[in-house]
Amino acid sequence: MKEQNNSNTFKIARAADSLSLGISIVVAVAIGTGLGVWLQQYWGNWALFGGIALGVLAAINNVFKAYKAQKASYDELGDTHAIIKPNSTKKTAQDDDINKNI
């Protein structure tokens, strides 16, 4: 029962993390657009496009930060659980023992 509860909790936390990234993208673009609309009355139409561009750049920054956090989490998981990396060519003493027994 406890395993199932942990699994469900993990799925909910993972979904919430993905949802928060989506919400942050929408909010970043909305704030940039709102800033552009507000500045449009002072500086003309180019301020709207500048605000939208600023919002899109902020959204890209949020995605990049989320990617870096996920990559760090994956690397930490790999270090703790000794996941074999596909391009690993490092030879160990255990490999030598296996080859001698063949």
Image (cartoon, rainbow, N blue to C red):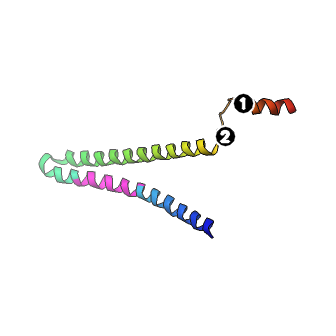
Drawn side of residue 101 relative to residue 23, left or right: right
Where does the image place residue 60, in percent across and percent down from the top left? 38, 45
Q: Is residue 5 magenta?
A: no
Viewer-nearest residue: 90 or 53 = 90
Which residue is drawn at the image coordinates 49% and 60% (left, top)? 13
Q: Outermost residue toward the left?
A: 42
According to the picture, the residue beneath numbered tag 1 turns out to be 92
Magenta segment's dominant SS is: helix
Does dot 2 land on a helix, a strand or a loop? loop
Viewer-nearest residue: 70 or 78 = 78
Range drawn in magenta? 21-34
Residues at marks 2 and 1 touching, judged by CB atoms closer than 8 Å: no
In the rendered view, would you say 76 is above or below 2? above
Where does the image place residue 23, in percent across and percent down from the top left? 38, 58
Which residue is drawn at the image coordinates 58% and 68% (left, top)? 5
Does dot 1 land on a helix, a strand or a loop? loop
In which quadrant is the C terminus drawn? top right
* Mark 1: amino acid: Thr
Characterize the local packing of mark 1: few (<14), some (14-19) or many (20 or more) Cα atoms within 10 angstroms: few
Corner quadrant of residue 95 = top right
Where does the image place residue 73, in percent across and percent down from the top left? 52, 46
Q: Earlier in the sequence, mark 2 or mark 1?
A: 2
According to the picture, the residue beneath numbered tag 2 turns out to be 84
Q: Outermost residue toward the bottom?
A: 1
Q: Is residue 23 magenta?
A: yes
